[in-house]
Image (spheres, helix red, strand yellow):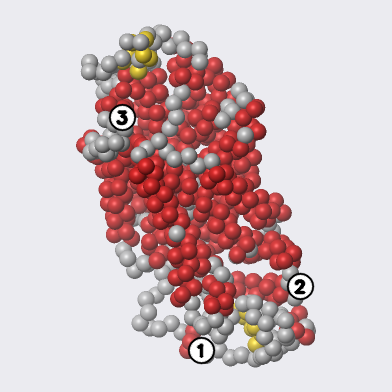
Amino acid sequence: MDIQCKYCNSVWITYKTEEAVNTNLLSNADVIHSCNENLTENGAVNGFSNHIVISTTTNSSSNKNNPDDPPPTVREKWGKNIEFLLSCVALSVGFGNVWRFPYTAFNNGGGAFVIPYLIVLFIIGRPIYYLEMVLGQFSNRGCVKVYDMAPLMRGIGVGQTVAIFTVITYYAAVLAITFRYLVVSFSPELPWSTCDPSWLDCVNSSFIGTIPMGNGTKVKSSAELYFQKTVLHKAASLDNGIGMPDWRLVLCLVVAWICITAILIRGIKSSGKFSYFLAIFPYIIIFILLVRSLTLPGAWTGIRYFFTPQWDKLLTIEVWYQAVTQCFFSLTICFGGLIVYSSFNNFQNNIYRHAVIITWLDTFTSMIAGCIVFGVMGHLAHVTNEKDIQKVVKNGPGLTFETYPDVIAKFDFVPQLFSVLFFFMLFLLGIGTLLGIVTSVITAIHDQKPHWKRWKVVLVVAVVGFCVGLVYLTPGGLSILELMDYYGATFVTLTLAVFELLTFAWIYGVDRVCKDIEFMLGIKTGMFWRICWGIVTPIVVLVILLFSIINYVPMELPSGYNAFGWCLYTVAVLQLPAWGLYAWYKQPGSDPITRLRAVLNPMSDWGPEDATTRAKYHSFIGEHDASLSMKKTCTASFVRRKLFG
């Protein structure tokens, strides 16, 4: 029975139990609705924070659909649960595991970094991962529509969509560079193994031995110069602009977007079928590369260097900051992708098991990737007679496109084979991650405009993503990539993550989330999850955000580029107040406080996608709210109620 509340314009919840009938406060009540109004009319008792109607009737015509209205759309579902699991693995395991984790660990205490990373994974990564999975599956909504739980906060989802689209554009560009390396790896001789005659102070990467000095300066390997001069035509600075993109990389970017579009254009079931290959085959290659890495001369020196703790760094907040940011990017949390993928699940899928499996698998993959990379670094130091391994380690793209190719060129047994395996693995990992984050953007658009054809949305996102991605393939592209990653991805994600956790834990309520889990999966949520969601995780993320703001240092770029970065950050973050004001403005009513309360409460259709299941859920929550409404209201009880019910 649906009756609209004249105070907050949301739908009242059907409620009737024997206990209610036998209670003086709820005598003969058959409808109860919580909107924090203290009334004495219609049988309500003064001070009781619910509207109570003693006898109501429902206009049957009001519940009937207009015959001219389009039939409600049923959300597409994964073909099998294993496809969801493998798709999440492909989403979470990507470039961040292969190049970001090894260097970050090495640069922040080696083995000592693993300790804060595992702690952060335990109290931040896994709780957020599970929380986003729960709300996505429960509501069958994407990263924007999920905020129907509190329409005032819908701008969080919009801002995250801006951030994730920023990531998409440069992630696809890195994928294009990877594809170019994959193609040239089939050459009879690896093109970066020898120096071009025009390169000064260059030594062949195929050379084994102590690297000589040239003209009083340290020479560079041909692999490093190949990446900077042949592939990127890298500019020394951005003072004269970013330049024009290389046409070969443009073609590679076209190939990357064709692959993504071809998989996504037919919907989530199509990408689910590809997940078997995208999630499993890279691990076969990783195992082959691990065996090869461990058998290289000097490999164990590099691995020991990777795991050797530098305990003094464990006490610095910088290490914990790096652990949190690595956890966010490695697991792809607070970007919206997990919410979207989970929204295509069947309602009673066991996502708790999936969350545990994926978070541990992601960490395991990062550790294995670290062993591979630093085994290779140890070998490089060995064959060049370099005692200080720090001098052969590079970060970010340099680790992937300079150092690793340099090592492969020194292999005496079919270097082309290992080059193909390495870059094919990277290409598959990149495709798997891009499928998830592009799906997030497509779903955000399609949820708002369900009448738009999906294939048209896919094509528009692909074309725009391709055009923006050209910027990163210019001579100044790497500098722009670092700029966009810092301001448009890392900074925005941390900021919106604080508000996301605030919304889920304190506006919607940890206890409400736990009741949703109980209704959906039939399991009680333990104290660990409640404390992490409500207290530990939000506080730690807030501290990390404040640390990043206090220790902010502009990037070493012309001031105009840093200003552009702040503009991008502002555009993404201002989505929160802008959409909040819009939701408040569109809310019917004259009392601003009542309208504010309304947009902080779930919308009338919030809940499971299936109408019958949603009706049962409303009854289930109505009984729970009725029991809570009899408790005292004060600050302490508010906190206790939000966390524990």
Residue at label 1?
A: 60
Image position of 100 with respect to 303: above or below: below
Count of marks overlaid on the render: 3
**Residue furthest out toward the front:** 559
| Circle 2/circle 1 CB separation < 8 Å | no
Q: Is residue 511 above or below residue 436?
A: below
Q: Amino acid at mark 3?
A: Ala
Q: Quadrant of the N terminus?
A: bottom right
Tell me if residue 422 comes above or below residue 138 in the rendering: above
Of callouts 3 and 2, which one flags the residue occurring earlier in the amino acid sequence? 3
| Residue 157 tag number | none
Which residue in the structure is indicated by mark 3?
236
User: Would you identify the image quadrant in which residue 133 lies?
Assistant: bottom right
Q: Nearer the viewer, mark 2 or mark 1?
A: 2
The quadrant of the rendering that contains the C terminus is bottom right
Q: Residues within 10 Å of mark 3 (few under 14, many from 20)?
A: few
| 47, 577: nearer the viewer | 577
Please indicate, yes or no, whether residue 32 appears anywhere in the rendered image. no
Q: Is residue 553 left or right of residue 317?
A: left
Q: Secondary structure at mark 3?
A: loop
In what element is the residue under mark 2? loop
CA distance for labels 3 and 2? 66 Å
Which amino acid type is marked by label 1?
Answer: Ser
Look at mark 2 in the image and give the residue it sits on.
632
* Observer able to see residue 211: yes
Mark 2 and mark 1: Cα distance apart in space: 37 Å
- Is residue 534 found left or right of 385 in the rendered image? right
Q: Nearer the viewer, mark 3 or mark 2?
A: 3
